[in-house]
Image (cartoon, coloured by chain):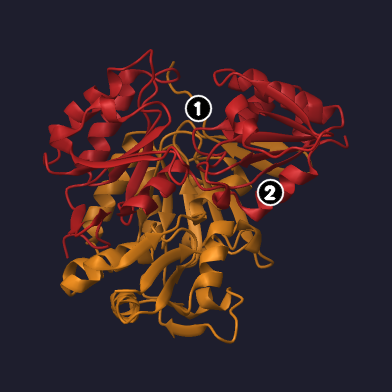
Chain colours: A red, B orange
């Protein structure tokens, strides 16, 4: 079994946020599996093979990548952001668990990257400066009542929440519903940060109070960060405000 | 006001995990403020000024850095990991909010980095592949009963939990207490991952069931990831197991 498989993330899209370790792994691999727009971010050589697929075919893509590695290829599976956060690393593990025994003998490595919430948080200041969580709003793979219960639990416990996959054409109602639930628990002045393509030419960034937050600020590539009751906004003359969650609470 | 201040994170310690954007910011800055061991990771030139301080003096360090920037210097504030996750970005914001009005006019930028839990998760497989949270176990800045309440809330809601600052010489009892609380909610077979200095020569890494998890696996530089009831371990012949949280739940 001479093949190997590495799972990488390109970071949020700004090329300066892809780690040198990931760039070296990309340079060393022969075959690339991933969602087309993520593969488009790579600067591949003519001898490197590009196997693009649709974003919803994660398990099929994982199996194809493992199969190629089992056949002896040096394979790279590409996500945006960090490959372990709502991305391909879990799909690869799931495919290994349910696949042929031989896949357990493969050399598999996952390399960490900068996930979207960290780039959006940095753009805003330090909204994740205290306890926080990351929740996917997609109900493709979990029931909506589980999502609602989690949103209530974390807001009630005082965690800041980063929402991934906040909206899609098929489910425009989820993000407004999430805001409605959170308004029952948090002050309407709680800052909500919308960040998309941070550090890229098409960046979109906004900070609005929870009472005014609506779905129109977001699409499926947006990361939405909702503060806790402790999260603060510092207004600055001629600059975007700084949003941060204090390091201490209740002491 | 010609000075500027950039807040960076070096990543978990493997030099290949510091982003090019952060390396460029370090090369461009004149004065460096940070905890000594983090500054030691930088390859500074003789003309770059090193202002090391103790790890517990975050607000004083933030004020000194802002003061230097207000005086016209190009200042870099250095954290490990990501500067926005239990690190210096929140201290800088707090210092701006409580400091002189002129500090609000400063050019301040925060650059994202690879935070410890992402490196530990990648080393293990994909334990953060589904909804998760990050909680600091330090009660220096919040009461222990808030920490207990948060641990119960997130475990009960089915989130994977990454613990930062799990233990120190002054508080050896907190991590065992956290495990005791979590054993009341989660199966004793739930995987617990201990990761320290991942990707460095002194790396420590272990996966143990929650029923056997104790504080001796951790020190203050360890990140501890506790699975949810859904998190799975794939045993592999001759290799570390893969630990992952499935992308779907209950569907």
> Residue most toward the top?
A170
Dots 1, 2 in contact, CB < 8 A: no
Disc 2 residue crowd, few under 14, some 14–19, many 20+, Cα 10 Å? some
Give the quarter of the image for residue B83.
bottom left
The chain letter for the residue carrying disc 2 is: A
The chain letter for the residue carrying disc 1 is: B
x, y percentage for residue B43? 61, 76
x, y percentage for residue B32? 46, 78
Q: Nearer the viewer, residue A33 or A42?
A: A42
Q: Nearer the viewer, residue B226 or A64?
A: A64
Does the image show residue B17? yes
Disc 1 residue crowd, few under 14, some 14–19, many 20+, Cα 10 Å? many
Foreground disc of the pair 1, 2: 2
Give the quarter of the image for residue B92.
bottom left
Quadrant of the snapshot with the C terminus of chain B: top left
x, y percentage for residue B15? 64, 63
Q: Residue at x 20, y 73 (%)?
A: B102
Q: Which mark is residue B247?
A: 1
Q: Residue at x 23, y 23 (%)?
A: A177
Q: Nearer the viewer, residue B170 or A114?
A: A114
**Dot 1 lies on which element?**
loop
Above/below status of A43 relative to A138: below
Q: Which residue was labeled with disc 2?
A: A23
């Amino acid at each position: 079994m001479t093949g190997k498989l590495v799972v990488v993330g390109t970071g949020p899209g700004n090329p300066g946020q892809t780690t040198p370790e990931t760039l070296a792994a990309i340079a060393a691999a022969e075959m690339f599996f991933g969602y087309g727009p993520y593969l488009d971010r790579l600067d591949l050589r003519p001898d490197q093979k590009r196997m693009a697929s649709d974003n919803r075919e994660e398990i099929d893509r994982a199996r194809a990548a493992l199969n190629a590695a089992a056949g002896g290829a040096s394979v790279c599976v590409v996500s945006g952001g960090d490959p372990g956060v709502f991305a391909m690393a879990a799909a690869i593990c799931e495919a290994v668990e349910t696949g042929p025994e031989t896949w357990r003998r493969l050399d598999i490595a996952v390399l960490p990257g900068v996930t979207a919430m960290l780039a959006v948080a940095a753009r805003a200041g330090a909204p994740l400066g205290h306890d926080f969580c990351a929740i996917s709003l997609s109900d493709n793979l979990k029931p909506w009542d589980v999502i609602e219960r989690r949103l209530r639990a974390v807001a009630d416990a005082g965690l800041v929440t980063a929402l991934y996959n906040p909206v899609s054409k098929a489910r425009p109602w989820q993000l407004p519903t999430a805001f409605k639930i959170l308004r029952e628990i948090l002050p309407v002045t709680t800052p909500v940060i919308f960040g998309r393509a941070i550090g890229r030419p098409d960046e979109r960034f906004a900070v609005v109070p929870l009472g005014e937050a609506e779905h129109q600020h977001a699409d499926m590539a947006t990361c939405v960060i909702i503060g806790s009751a402790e999260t603060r906004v510092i207004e600055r003359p001629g600059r975007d405000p700084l949003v941060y969650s204090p390091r201490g609470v209740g002491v």
